[in-house]
Amino acid sequence: MDASALYKFSSGLYVVSADDGERPGACIVNTGLQVTSAPLQVSVTVNKENFTCGVIERAGHFSLAVVDESADMLFVGRFGFRTSATEDKFDGIASAVSATGDPYPTEHVCSFVACRVVQTVDVGTHLVFVGEVADAGNLSGVAPMTYAYYHGILKGKTPPKASSYVEGIS
């Protein structure tokens, strides 16, 4: 089996974040997806071991910001290769707070949605959060970053906690 075939699935990069009133959590995912239009709902899949997953569970809401092609590996690394358990990932960058009370970056992102969790599905190593959109906005006209752009142009790697990680293929 050639599991690298899955890398041809079209997806983007997103910062998913939540604030449970104690500490905000945020991480990079490639699993944001609109699932319905009426009601307007999106889903995001987060590794159970990520600090952010627990924050979303406790908060019952999240923001999902669409990373754009202006982002560099420093930005991706800030949200994707560090833990919110010990770092404030929003320190020193432009950000805002959504209608659900969740922070989201306002630089290197072209849009965002804020959602209230309406369903959580356990899929083994990850939880899928389905959220009803409470707020949304466009932040720039820069093209969204696709996962193919991340791998091909930025030469980014897939970390072990990513839902698309397959051992031996990065």
Image: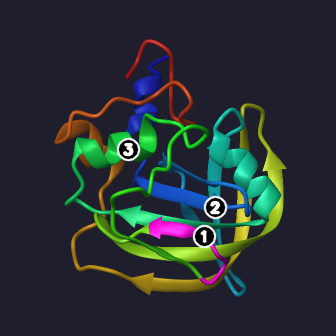
Residue type at mark 3 is Arg
In the figure, is residue 40 to the left or right of 108?
right
Neighbour tally class for label 1: few under 14, some 14-19, many 20 plus, Cα within 10 Å:
many
Checking the image for residue 102, the label placed there is: 1
| 10 Å crowding of disc 3: few (<14), some (14-19), many (20+) | some
Q: CA distance from mark 3 to mark 1?
A: 17 Å
Task: Determine whether the residue tagged by mark 1 lies in a helix, strand or loop.
Answer: loop
Q: Is residue 139 left or right of residue 60?
A: left
Confirm or deny contact between disc 2 and disc 3 (CB under 8 A).
no
Name which quarter of the figure residue 108 lies in.
bottom left
Q: Amino acid at mark 1?
A: Asp
Q: Position of residue 83 (x, y in %)?
A: 53, 37
The picture places residue 169, in percent across and down from the top left corner, at 40, 19
Disc 2: which residue: 18
- Disc 2 residue type? Ala
CA separation, marks 2 and 1? 5 Å
Say which of 16 and 7 sits in front. Answer: 16
Q: As rendered, which of 16 and 121 lies closer to the eye?
A: 16
Q: Which mark is residue 78?
A: 3
Q: Which residues are magenta?
A: 99-104
Q: Answer yes or no: do the residues labelled 2 and 1 have beta carbons within 8 Å?
A: yes
Residue 23 image point, x, y percent: 66, 54
The tag earlier along the polypeptide, 3 or 1, is: 3
